[in-house]
Amino acid sequence: MKKTTLLAAALLASTALSTQAETLRWARAGDSLTLDPHAQNEGPTHTIAHQIYEPLIIRDATGTPEPALATDWAPKADDPNVWVFNLREGVTFHDGAAFDSSDVVFSFQRAQTEDSDMKELLNSIVEVRATGPYQVEFVTDGPNPILPNNLTNLFIMDEDWTKANNAEKVQDFEGGEDTFSAKNANGTGAYMVETREPDVKTVLKQFPDYWGKGQFPLEVTEIIYTPIQNASTRVAALLSGEVDLIQDVPVQDLGRVAGTDGLEVRTAPQNRVIFLGLNMGAADIERDDVEGANPLADARVRQAMNMAINRDAIKQVVMRGQSQPAGMIAPPFVNGWTAEKDAVPATDIAKAKELMAEAGYGDGFSLQLDCPNDRYINDEGICQAVVGMFAQIGITVNLDAKPKAQHFPLIANGTTDFYMLGWGVPTYDSEYIFNFLVHSRGDDRGSWNATGYANPELDAKIQSLASETDLTVRDATISDIWDVVQAETLYLPIHHQVLNWGAKANVKVNPDPEDQPKIKYVTIE
Amino acid sequence: MLAYIIRRVLQSVLVLLVVGLVAFSMFRFVGDPIDNMLGQERTQADIERLRDVLGLDDPFPVQYWKFMSQAAEGNFGISYRQGRPVSDILLERAPATLELAAVSGLFAITFGIGFGVLTAIRRGGLLSSTVMTLSLVGVSLPTFLIGILLIYLFSVELGWLPSFGRGDTVMIGGWSTGFLTTSGLKALILPSITLGLYQMTLIMRLVRSEMLEVLRQDYIRFARARGLRERSVNFRHALKNTLVPVITVTGLQLGSIIAFAIITETVFQWPGVGLLFINAIQFVDIPVMAAYLMLISVMFVGINLIVDLLYVAIDPRLRSDSSKRGH
């Protein structure tokens, strides 16, 4: 909390003495909500946690899984319900305690408790048991071929430290108490917490005993992370040289940043696809002008709407070139994505009008589109653009744009007929998309599917993915399911979001698909 | 006198209760915090459990009653966003806002009175016309635009001052202050000007018109006739008599400086209660929103109460009954 000029002077002196010392001043819109690694399943929180804590498996800057605290993993030879993970030896926590299998068992048990935000990703795990000081077994409720994909944001805490500080409970809104682990951290990661003021500043220092020394660049010795909410201020801070790296550069400022000497914009596709959902399941929908029928239930209407969207125009005008038009609702990193399926549907107004006429809506109809205005890049602008495009085929769209806190409950409660949604896939596998967006709405699956689409045959196929151990068969099923989703025009894909990070030219950092810079990989020239 | 005070205090408490009730009746329209609190993998069961824990399905008068009865014991609950006690967060954030408000207030009063006197004395002069025109610009531009313009000029182009944050702070007791470090002082300049500019122009125009009024009075003419020096006439006789309404207005404006700090704090990423409130709205952090609104209304009600009481103290006609008893 306290940082005096004396300390600053000492830092300056150490910078002068050692050519190795490099401070990275880094800003993005939001701060980590808590240092507790299991309390929030949310981007900025995981991003900071990734510097301090480590999962068993980490995704590198390209999204490829890489061993972190585990060295190798495989299903058990004689039991398909068990995964065996061998753990890294010689790893220490920031407080000097040694890492072993008991910490893994403890962390998973903690992450599976009621108050944990990470528990849904682990719901197939029945038991985690230590079979040696550096080996653990995960017992699942059936064969789970993609379990490792779910573990890349699941951070390992030290059992003794957590227990000694009474932080076994993840978060307690009833008790009214601070959870120790929300303000303090003790991980195995490359950086340890020096000071932290929530929403103001977090200073991280390189951990001298990090196991990965020599394996990773580790050129940044100190990280100063400051959230800057206002986009103009954030860009100004980069332009004036007060920060070295910013995330979320607004598309209208890209030219300004790229045109400044010594600054660069680094662009890469994000693991997030933006699309529109249609309530096709209801017999009649409320926010339209068609009485006693649901025009969206007719596949021809949905196809016509899909053809009416000019994705290139959205890219050029709304996104200023910063998007990748999409034909399917899977980001390109995901297992099951193919270039053919993602081919952008051609814009064909004449054909769309024909389909509308065939469906009996030649004179069009009107409909309400619900859209967030503070969640995705230019979300409201995209919605405004599609309103004009649908007008061309006779559909009058009334746009209702509102903050995310009001928009997402509409999808959760199913009280919307036509809505925008963006989807990221942390497991990098299509099953995750199907479970939440395609499976009919039920207790365990379909919680984000507000389309009202219910296809028992398809549901059975989706469920079979969870335990299909033959990966060839599994991939074939995934492909089949996508064919149905595409044929039914379940969703109207818009584009894959593109990430823009602005950085000093000498700071070599590439946007990773999850928008999570992992500073241990960063090099400085 | 005592009866008057008691009556006023009771009225103030009533105002606070009504503010709380109105605030709670509106939180439902801000949105639903659940989606922000749970990850995208949440199930219906998770949603229902958390709604139940937080009492979000209770009718709003029940939620209001729970909040008020806990608040009366000094417990404002746990922030949904940060998972920490709201009272801790508010105490942590208050110094930033109060320091910013104090510096802006000082800036507004000093320059407001200075320019006000100047433009009144040198009426029609080139300098005062320029100041008057600029003040018109200052009063008509929205705060966020002024902030962005200042950042662009002094941070990006000239590189003199920081564009965001508070700089380095020093903890004294539980109070984090930016007054004791160079970077802390430099960080105060742009946000203070942004926040205080409107009040400055207001005070300036008020002082100017009052001065012009007073300068026409007979006693000023007599002072001049007596051959007093111009400076003595302007400052000892004229300015003194303009200050009474200025002090009243300034006192009332102090509350708005703190309340309007929201925009300035957002533009400059100033870690005060205003920024906290904006974040709370986006997240639908009901305990923080409620505590902030109550705090601001306590402040406004308190300032108004003090002003009213001062009025009684200053105006002898309002305390005729007590003076009768006293003498």
Image (cartoon, coloured by chain):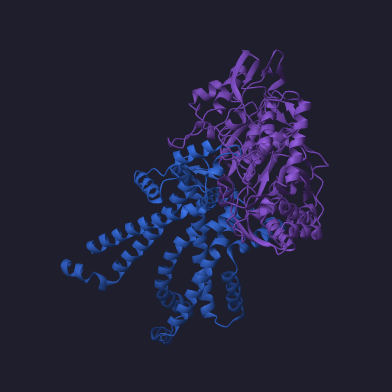
Chain colours: A purple, B blue
B205 relative position to B18: left or right: right
Task: Please give the name of the residue rendered at 65% of the width and 54% of the height, measured from the top-left corner.
Answer: A233
Image coordinates of residue A465 in percent, x first then y, are 70, 29
Residue A389 visible somewhere in the drawing:
yes
Q: Is residue B70 above or below residue A193?
A: below
Circle count: 0
Dividing the picture into quadrants, the one containing residue B8 is bottom left
Q: Is residue A449 above or below residue A285?
A: above
Q: A300 and B161: which one is in front?
A: A300
Dividing the picture into quadrants, the one containing residue A292 is bottom right
Residue B166 visible somewhere in the drawing:
no
Question: Which quadrant is the C terminus of chain B positioned in?
Answer: bottom left
Task: Please give the name of the residue rendered at 43% of the width and 78% of the height, measured from the top-left corner.
Answer: B238
Q: A274 and A200: which one is in front?
A: A274
Dividing the picture into quadrants, the one containing residue A112 is top right
Image coordinates of residue B31 in percent, x first then y, are 52, 51
Image coordinates of residue B132 in percent, x first then y, are 58, 76
Question: Which quadrant is the N terminus of chain B positioned in?
Answer: bottom left
Q: Is residue A414 above or below residue A98?
A: below
Image coordinates of residue A456 in percent, x first then y, are 65, 36
Q: Is residue B296 above or below residue A138?
A: below
